[in-house]
Image: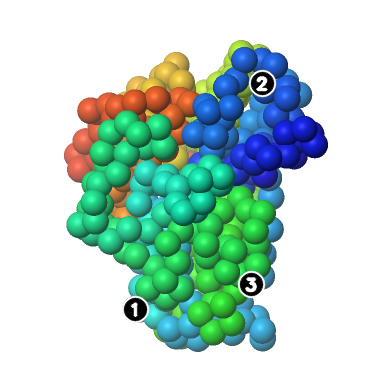
Amino acid sequence: CVRVPKMLTVLTIAITSVVRSKTHLQVPLTKLLRKGTSLHTMQAASALTTMDKRGGFQRATSKHRAVINDDFPAEADRYHLHIALACPWACGVLAMLKLKGLDHVISYSIVHPTWGKTKPDDDSDKHHGWIFKNPGDEAFPNSLGHGLFECDDALIPDTVTNCKSVREVYELCGDFKGPFTTPVFYDKKTSTIINNESIEIMRMLNFDFNEFAKYPDINLYPVEEEKSLMELNDSLVYPKINNGVYKCGFAHSQEAYDQAVKELFEALEEVEVRLSKTRYLVGDKFTWLDLRLFMTMVRFDPVYTCYFKTNKKRLVDYPNLLGYVRDIYSMDEVKGVINMKHIKTHYYTSHPVHNTFGIIPVYDGPDLNEPHDREKITNSLS
């Protein structure tokens, strides 16, 4: 939450992230108000980010980082995932669960895509975030009262904890600061959040539950490519693309945006060239890093080009990247977790500071069911 001067301590503004924005705003309230930001706007926006001095987006580190071990052993029906289909990080975790065939031993719930008030009975608490609803519940507006966004059949309420919001899950486990993000890997036996870092949850699902998995031979972490995958993730895919789109969308200055968008499109050009030589990022094997890149690129044209102002080029302007996205989308387990309605609804309705009236654009991106022909590419990385 925002730290405010004593004279403003009665004005508490709860801040959370969007999609895996593991951050909270650390810009003093008085500075924002001096810039002309109204208090009402700030409260409704769930402010999204920690900003550096130049107005650049910064993502904080996930703080729940336990793993499967002697304290938390791999057991059937012990663990539960809290998932937002709109969130690329959480959606990647759900895809991994499906790819390994673990959804019969690890349960999951799915939040409503529109952020809602997480303390609806407390008028002084303005925090909006991920909330649970039942299919068929009454539609509700964004935090400024605009629009009506339905409770569709994709929603799965949290019947494990019976919490009404992801924030409530965190608080149940003793975390009252947040940010209250997805995915959440929850231990039903000890009522503990094991982990909320998507890349670590994916790794646990890949390796630690094979005795229960329908597809134990599926391995998205090939040992021979471990070093090259991490180097590519750390230098290119995560900082400039996965996180890069957020740096563009949540920049608070032209300088920060210009730098972020430059890095993003330089990285996309590099990936486009790489994918002209090999089917996947590091060869002919589909890996966790391909899944992470896919989750960003499948959202690129319908959301990021407009909402995050990443409009220098579109996915459809990169023939190799487009084919690559279609290739991965053709996997039934991946296709099954992509809900474009949830994706678009979340981004366009949850942050009124960016889209006051919650108007959702019509475009869903290119047809991903068209042939991709990626299997014809021979690995020629050098």
Q: Quadrant of residue 198?
A: bottom right
How far from the left and from the top, in percent, is residue 310? 46, 22
Residue 323 to residue 180: above or below: above
- Amino acid at dot 2: Leu
Q: For mark 1, what is the residue?
A: 104
Q: Label 1's element?
A: loop
Left/right placement of residue 285 relative to residue 235 reads: left
Pick the front one: 363 or 173: 173
Crowdedness of circle 2 by 10 Å Cα count: few (<14), some, many (20+)?
Answer: few
How far from the left and from the top, in percent, is residue 175? 65, 62
Pick the front one: 157 or 8: 8
Residue, x 53% and y 42% (percent of image)?
A: 126
Residue 247 to residue 201: above or below: above
Q: Quadrant of residue 8?
A: top right
Pick the front one: 184 or 321: 184
Residue, x 20% and y 43% (percent of image)?
A: 369
How far from the left and from the top, in percent, is residue 219? 47, 67
Q: For mark 3, what is the residue?
A: 67
- Amino acid at dot 1: His
Which comes sooner in the sequence, label 2 or label 1?
2
Which comes sooner in the sequence, label 3 or label 1?
3
User: Dividing the image into 4 quarters, which one contains the N terminus?
Assistant: top right
Residue 306 to residue 303: above or below: above
Q: Which mark is residue 33?
A: 2
Say if residue 99 shows up in the picture.
Answer: no
Q: Are marks 3 and 1 in contact (CB under 8 Å)?
A: no
Q: CA distance from mark 2 to mark 1?
A: 50 Å
How far from the left and from the top, in percent, is residue 65? 67, 64
